[in-house]
Image (cartoon, rainbow, N blue to C red):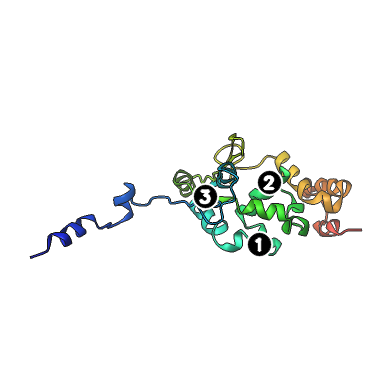
Amino acid sequence: MTPEWKRRQEELRLRGLGQMFGVDKPVIGMVHLLPLPGSPNYDGRGLDPVIDWALRDVEVYQKAKERVGTGEHRWNPDCRETADHSIPYVVAATLMDGTVTPRSFNDAHLWNPDLRALMQKIEVVANEEFTKAYVKLPVEHRTRVTVVTRSGERLVGEAGGDQDELSAQMSDTQIEDKFRGLCEEVLGAKQVTSILRSLWHLEKMENVNAIPPAFVLD
C-alpha cells in the first residue's frame, strides 16, 4: 500500500512546463537585476537604478535569439565579426548613436566602456508571436525594443512585417541610400555617385570589367 505522503507527493510533482504555464511551449525570459535592498552588494541608491537597469528588453523571433542573441560572447564581442552578429551590441550602438553604420563596428565603438556597460543592461527574449510570423509565408522578421528610462518613460520601437520588412522588395531609393551609407565614408560621395551611375546602367556598358576598379581608393 502506497503511503499517504508519497501519494500526495506524486500528485504535486510537476510533469511538464505545460502544467505550470498552461501552454506546451512557453517563452521563458530572464531579467538581470542590480543587487536589491537587503542583498550584500546593495548600494543604497533605491530602486530607480534597478528599474533603469532591468527594463531594456529586445523581443525577437526564436531563430534570431538562437543565432545572435544567445551566448556570453554576444555580450562580450572581441572583434567586428562577433559584434555585427550580436543583438546586444547592435542595439546598444543604435541607442547611443541613433543609427548603425560601418563606423559602429570600429575599435572606438567596440571597446567603448559606455557601450559595453549599456550592453549588459539588454535582455534578449523570444516573442512567440514574432516566432510564428517568422515561420509562416511570407516570412516576417519582427523585432521590438523597449526602453524604460529612469524617470519611468517607456520608449518602444518595432521593425518588420511592414514597409521596413527585411524580406520585402526594396525601392531603388532605399537601395541607393543603403549603398551610399555603406560606402561614402570610405570612397567619398563623388566616387560613389560614379559607381552608382554605372551600376544603374549595366545594360549600356560595353565591358563590366570596368566596375571593380571603381571600388579601389586612389
In the rendered view, would you say 148 is above or below 72? above
Which is in the foreground here, disc 2 or disc 3? 3
In space, the residues marked 2 and 3 are separated at their CA atoms by 29 Å
Where does the C terminus fall, quadrant-wise?
bottom right
Amino acid type of the residue tagged 3 in the rendering: Leu
The answer to whether residue 193 shows anywhere in this view is yes
Q: Position of residue 64 (x, y in %)?
A: 54, 53
Number of the front mark, 3 or 1:
3
In the image shown, does 188 or 121 lie closer to the viewer? 121
Which secondary structure lies at badge 2?
Answer: helix
**Distance of label 2 from label 1 (alpha carbons):** 16 Å
**Residue 6 falls in which quadrant of the image?**
bottom left
Q: Residues within 10 Å of mark 2 (few under 14, many from 20)?
A: some
Of pointers 2 and 1, the one earlier in the residue sequence: 1
Relative to 117, 4 lies left or right? left
Residue at the disc numbered 3: 36
Residue holding disc 1: 77
Q: Is 203 placed above or below 162 here?
A: below
Q: Which residue has dot 2 on it?
A: 94
